[in-house]
Image (cartoon, rainbow, N blue to C red):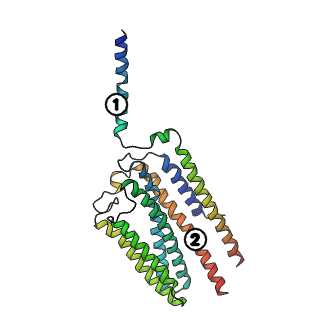
Amino acid sequence: MLKWWKISSVILILYSIVWGLLNNVPRLDILNETIRNVYYHVPIWFAMLFQMGLSVVYAIKQLAKNDLQSDLISNQAAQTGLFFALPGLLTGCMWAKFTWLTWWTFKDPKLNGVAIAVLIYLAYFILRSSIEDEQKKARIAAVYNIFAFVMMFVFIMILPRITDSLHPGNGGNAKFAQYDMDSNLRTVFYPAVIGWILLSLWIFDVKKRLAILTHKQNEE
Amino acid sequence: MKNKIILILTGLLFPFFGIAQEVTTSPDMADAFRRDGKIYVVITVLAIIFICLIGYLVSIDLKLRKLENKH
C-alpha cells in the first residue's frame, strides 16, 4: 500500500519521540533535560537542508534539459524546505530561551544566517511567481535557485564556523561529538535524522504529485 | 548500649549522606518526573498527535493516488 520508506519514516520518528524522552542523556549544566532537543531541532534542520539540496538538483536538471516539470518539482522541494524551516526556527527559539536566556540573539551568526537564508528563499518564490512566460520562469527560477542554495550554504554552514558562534561545533565551540554526543545520544539522533529526512521526502512527494497533476489538468 | 546502637545506625547511614550530596551537586534533571511515571503522559500525547498527523498525510496520499489513476 505505502512505500517502505514512508513507513520507516514514521517508525523512526516514533522511536525518536518515545526513546528520545526515555533514554539516559548526559547530565550537563545549563542544558539539563533540554539536551533532548538535539533529537528534534537538529534533524528538522537537516530535513530542511536536504529539501533545499533536492530543489537545487532539480534546478540544475531544468537548466540542463530545459524541461518544465523539473522547475515545478524544484519549486515544490523549496516550499517543503521552507516549511521545515518554521519548526526548526521555533524549536531553536525555545531551546535558546532556556539555555542562552533569549528567544533570539543577533550575536549568533547562525541565527542571522538562517534569517537571511529564509528571506533569500522567500525572494525565490516571489521572483518565480512574478514571471508569466513559462520557459522564462523556469530558467530564471532555476538560476536564482542555485544562487539561493549557495548563499544559504555560506550563511548557515560556513560563516558560523569561521566567526564566533554560540552553536556547538561553530566558532571556537566544541562540537557535540567532542564532549557529550555520547553513544546514548547517537542511538536516537541518527535514526531521528533519517526519519525526518524521509518524512520531508514524503511531504515533498505528495506536493510534487499534486503539482504535476494540476499542471496536467491546466494543459488539457 | 542504646548509644552504641544509635552510633552504629548513624554509621550505616553515612553512605546515604554521600549519595544525597552527589545528587544535589549534579545538574538538575527531571528525575522525580520520571520516577512518578508522568513522562509516559508526555510521550503518549506526543505519539498520539504525531500518529494523527501521519494518518492525515496517508489519507491525502491515497486520495491523490486515486486522482492520479483516473488520469
How far apart, in angstroms, are the residues tagged by discs 1 and 2?
57 Å
| Residue A213 rendering spot, x and y as whole percentages | 64, 79
Q: Residue under label 2, please give it.
A: A205
What crowding class fits label 1: few (fewer than 14 Cα within 10 Å), some (14-19), or many (20 or more)?
few
Q: Residue under label 1, please give it.
A: B18
Q: Is residue A173 above or below residue B61?
A: above
Quadrant of residue B66 in the image? bottom right
Residue at coordinates 54% horizontally, 68% vertically from top-left? A201
Q: Amino acid at mark 2?
A: Asp
Assign a secondary structure to mark 2: helix
Assign a secondary structure to mark 1: helix
Q: Amino acid at mark 1?
A: Gly
| Residue A59 rendering spot, x and y as whole percentages | 48, 80
Q: Nearer the viewer, residue A25 or A61?
A: A25
Q: Is residue A131 above or below residue A170?
A: below
Q: Nearer the viewer, residue A106 or A187?
A: A106
Quadrant of residue A217 in the image? bottom right
Residue at coordinates 53% horizontally, 57% vertically from top-left? A13
Is A201 situated left or right of B68 in this image? left
Is A175 situated left or right of A199 in this image? left
> How many numbered marks, from 0 up?
2
What crowding class fits label 2: few (fewer than 14 Cα within 10 Å), some (14-19), or many (20 or more)?
some
